[in-house]
Image (tube, helix red, strand yellow):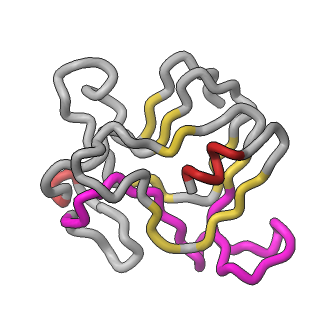
């Protein structure tokens, strides 16, 4: 998904199929994030056969953005960490980043889970799900 975000241009929509998506697959990459872009929308909740945005069902097609880059958290059937004590090992500090992004960026239809902002230094000391930096939030 990060590749799609990197190549996206203003006005693009990225449709993401159900399942668990991670910003990295190497536990040493704790700073890896899904980096949002201004004027780009990412939508979860797709089965993979839809041809229109209104056909998605985010409650049935659970789409997870997870920081569990070392693949050892305790998760539910959808891949969601349900308690902080279910995080094991070293997860990504943040799952999504909106640093220097305008409020025109959109994230819709996702469960964001498994971020582990436990480093003593800013910005990795808070905001396990998302870091905003100087973004405008809505």
User: Which secondary structure is most common in the magenta stretch?
Assistant: loop
Give the residue drawn at x 43%, y 51%: 23
The image quadrant where one finds the N terminus is bottom right
Was residue 95 drawn as part of the magenta stretch in this picture? no
Rendered location of residue 34, percent (x, y): 50, 45
The foreground one among 89 and 85 is 89
Rendered location of residue 20, percent (x, y): 44, 68
Was residue 66 drawn as part of the magenta stretch in this picture? yes
Left or right, residue 64 beside residue 138:
left
Give the residue drawn at x 81%, y 66%: 53
Give the residue drawn at x 39%, y 57%: 66
Task: Name the quadrant containing residue 69.
Answer: bottom left
Looking at the rendering, the stretch of residues picked out in magenta corresponds to 43-72
The image quadrant where one finds the C terminus is top right
Position of 108 relative to 80 (above/below):
above
Task: Name the quadrant containing residue 124.
Answer: top left
């Amino acid at each position: 998904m990060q590749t799609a975000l990197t190549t996206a241009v203003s006005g693009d929509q990225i449709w993401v199929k159900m399942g668990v998506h991670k910003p990295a697959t190497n536990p040493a990459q704790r700073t890896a994030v899904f980096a949002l872009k201004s004027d780009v929308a990412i939508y979860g909740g797709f089965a993979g056969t839809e041809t229109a945005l209104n056909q998605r069902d985010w409650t049935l097609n659970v789409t997870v953005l997870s920081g569990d880059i070392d693949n050892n958290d305790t998760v539910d059937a959808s891949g969601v960490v349900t308690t902080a004590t279910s995080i094991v090992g070293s997860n990504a500090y943040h799952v999504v980043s909106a640093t220097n992004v305008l409020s025109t960026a959109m994230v819709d239809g996702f469960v964001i889970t498994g971020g582990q902002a436990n480093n003593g230094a800013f910005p990795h000391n808070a905001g396990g799900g998302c870091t905003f930096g100087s973004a405008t939030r809505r």
